[in-house]
Image (cartoon, rainbow, N blue to C red):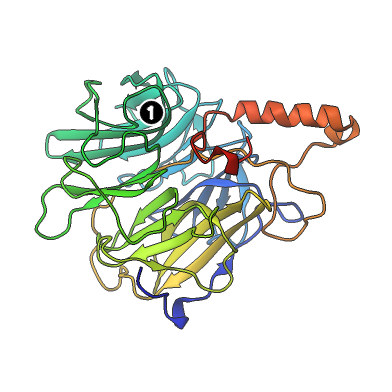
Amino acid sequence: MSGAVTAADSQWSVLGLQVPGSVDRPVWSLAISPAHPAIMLQATQGRGVLRSSDSGATWSPVLTADSAAWVVHFDPQQPTVVYAGTPTQGLWRSADEGKSWVRAGQGLDPDVRAIDVAPGLVLAGTAHGVYYSTDAAASWHSLGLATLAIAAVAVIQDGSTTTLFAGADNGTAGGYLQTSTGLSGAWSIVHGNFPADATLATIAVGPAPSGSTGHSIFAGTSQGLYRSDDTGASWNPVAGLPQADVNAVSINPWSGDQIYVGSDGDQGQGGVFRSLDHGSTWTPLAGTGFPHRPRVTALALQPGPALLVLADTWNPTTNEIGLYRIPDTAAATSASSNPVTSPTARATALPTPQPRTASSQAHGTGGFELPVAARTLGIGAAVAIVLVLALVVRRWRMRRQDLQTYRR
């Protein structure tokens, strides 16, 4: 990896509490309005969807039909429209940048974990395969892969050709990354240099580098970051990053060569990394103010005079949770270049945190809080409640070789 960022870029700031006077909950997805960047949405474990209209200084609950939400995703063609996926209440749609919501999941599996949107098409990854809608999420149709828990989806449209990608974090298959042309449901496993046993957490799509054809696709997996520069025809591992799970990938909408990655920190190698040359070299955004050994659970980019990088973190050992922001003055912005088409899909297949300790009350620390009734029932009843919570949010990405690192 290349050297650390300059001193001007090296200070992370912590953003506002989710609920003043209470501990934060883990965040699985973070989305910023393409029309009004001060408007942000977080999909959380325990508080549903939270909304901020002041760039993260304060937050309000806006979707609490399910106590958890796995993903939030703005429609780039209709910037006021946003979708949210939940583990038991399916998919929800908002037409006012997340202020109000209606359920929009007729015919859809109730456990929605990944969303991507293209003109005339909404794609959803669920605990039992892939679904699509061509009527703005009013009705849904299965695309198969029912034996896979889909953690990431992506849509690429080139003229009359539509290419779909679906990445799984659990299930029965000969490979966890699959692709299909059109809406036929005829999926094929991605082979070649892509490892068959690598589970996926995220897929991001952007323009290919100069001299290449098609689109670049970045896949965050349990075995690091993989890239294709020919719309998925061939894949290669991306060098220069720590050997850690990649949970989030964001592409700078003002330059397709500028890539941001969020990874796990269980071995002391996690954090946020940036490449300005399409993934050839990487720089850790390891400035002061960022937590030690973080697990980055969500990542987003906020335009401004300097591009702002936002990262949600969670430490499963200490239950420290927080939302952090840092300016990247080396990145292209709206003032310096024209935007490029850079659709992304973010899945939130992350494990359920354990109840936080009662002694930790500082901002940025948290996890599940047992209800008052549970605390009065004694240790046995409290443990039973925790086990029920864990069962509800099963099927997540961390079921693999490093399972001992996590607590289900």
Along the viewing direction, whichever of 19 and 348 lies nearer the viewer: 348
Please, is residue 367 above or below residue 335 in the view?
above
State the residue in front, 288 or 41. 288
Q: Position of residue 102 (x, y in %)?
A: 51, 31
Q: State the quadrant of the N terminus.
A: bottom left
Q: Amino acid at mark 1?
A: Ala
For residue 98, above or below residue 394: below
Q: Position of residue 137 (x, y in %)?
A: 38, 28
Left or right of residue 179: residue 302: right
Q: Position of residue 258 (x, y in %)?
A: 30, 63
Quadrant in which the C terminus appears = top right
Q: Quadrant of residue 148?
A: top left
Q: Which residue is mark 1?
A: 137
Please indicate, yes or no, whether residue 36 appears anywhere in the rendered image.
Answer: no
Is residue 359 shown left or right of residue 87?
Answer: right
Q: Is residue 368 visible?
A: yes
Q: Residue at x 37, y 54 (%)?
A: 250
Residue name at image x 33 percent, y 26 percent: 133
Residue 74 lies in what quarter of the image? top left
318 up-or-down from 195: above or below: below
Q: Nearer the viewer, residue 133 or 152?
A: 152
Which residue corresponds to the image point at 86% horizontal and 32% vertical from the top-left?
379
Mark 1 neighbour class, 10 Å CA radius: few under 14, some 14 to 19, many 20 or more = many
Q: Is residue 6 above or below residue 148?
A: below
Q: Is residue 196 left or right of residue 374?
A: left
Q: Nearer the viewer, residue 226 or 321?
A: 226
Residue 312, x across and y down, in percent: 54, 55
**Residue lying at the far bottom of the rendered structure:** 7
